[in-house]
Image (cartoon, grey):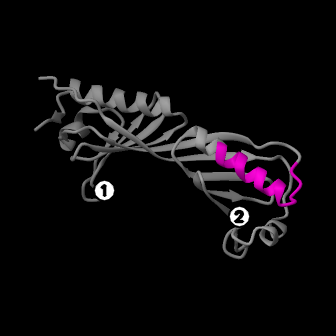
Amino acid sequence: MLVFTKPIIDIVNVVASATVDQALDLNDITKKFPDTEYHPEQFPGLVFRLKNPKTATLIFRTGKMVCTGSKSEELAKKAVKTVVQKLRKGGIKIKKDAVVTVQNIVSSINLRGKINLEKAARTLPRSMYEPEQFPGLIHRMVDPKTVILVFASGKLVCTGAKTAKDVYRAVNNLHSLLEEKDLMMYD
């Protein structure tokens, strides 16, 4: 019997890389922005945190950056743009605007039903379930290229998507497959 409730999808983290295509003096940035964190003996990147959007951007001396913590592709791009603007206002000469690329979108999903993981492991292609090592089933989707962690509670974690559209497509594809193969149980 198909009940097919709509999954609740929540994007929890967007990881984006960026570059300003020039070398940066991280010691100079630290002097001009005392709130940044820079401990080169532990890690080669400087951490530049923003309150709005709430993100952390790692800045490397090569001019490459990695922004984490935003809840959408747009906010990730806005965060990098804001960091570059703040650096410029603070006297750091940056010639070009940052080119931002979304690398990974992590989302949390609730399918609002239970999943038989033993049966799912035998039924779903490219799936791995070893409960003594990890409580969830690991499903590797080819299109869109994502990895979805599937838990018996009906909760999922989707990672590897490059766009929000891909997150929705991956989750809906898997949800349809679970329904089709009669692997979902509803109260």
Foreground residue among 156 and 54: 54
Residue named by callout 1: 134
Main SS of the magenta part reads helix
Q: Viewed as shown, does residue 118 lie left or right of 162? A: left
Q: Are marks 1 and 2 in contact (CB under 8 Å)?
A: no
Provide the secondary structure element on which disc 1 rests: loop
Considering the image in quadrants, where does the N terminus appear? top left
Measured as percent of width and height from the top left, residue 84 is found at 77, 51
Left or right of 147, for residue 117: left
Q: Position of residue 164 (x, y in %)?
A: 49, 34
Residue 70 against residue 34 in the figure, above or below: above
Cα separation between marks 1 and 2: 32 Å
**What's the magenta region?**
78-94
Q: Earlier in the sequence, mark 1 or mark 2?
A: 2
- Name the amino acid, label 2: Gly
Q: Give the residue displayed 24% in from the left and 30% down from the top.
A: 178
Question: Amino acid type of disc 1?
Answer: Phe
Against 115, residue 32 (above or below) is below
Q: Residue at x 33, y 31 (%)?
A: 174
Q: Residue at x 79, y 57 (%)?
A: 87
Give percent across and percent down for residue 97: 80, 42
Q: Which residue is mark 2?
A: 45
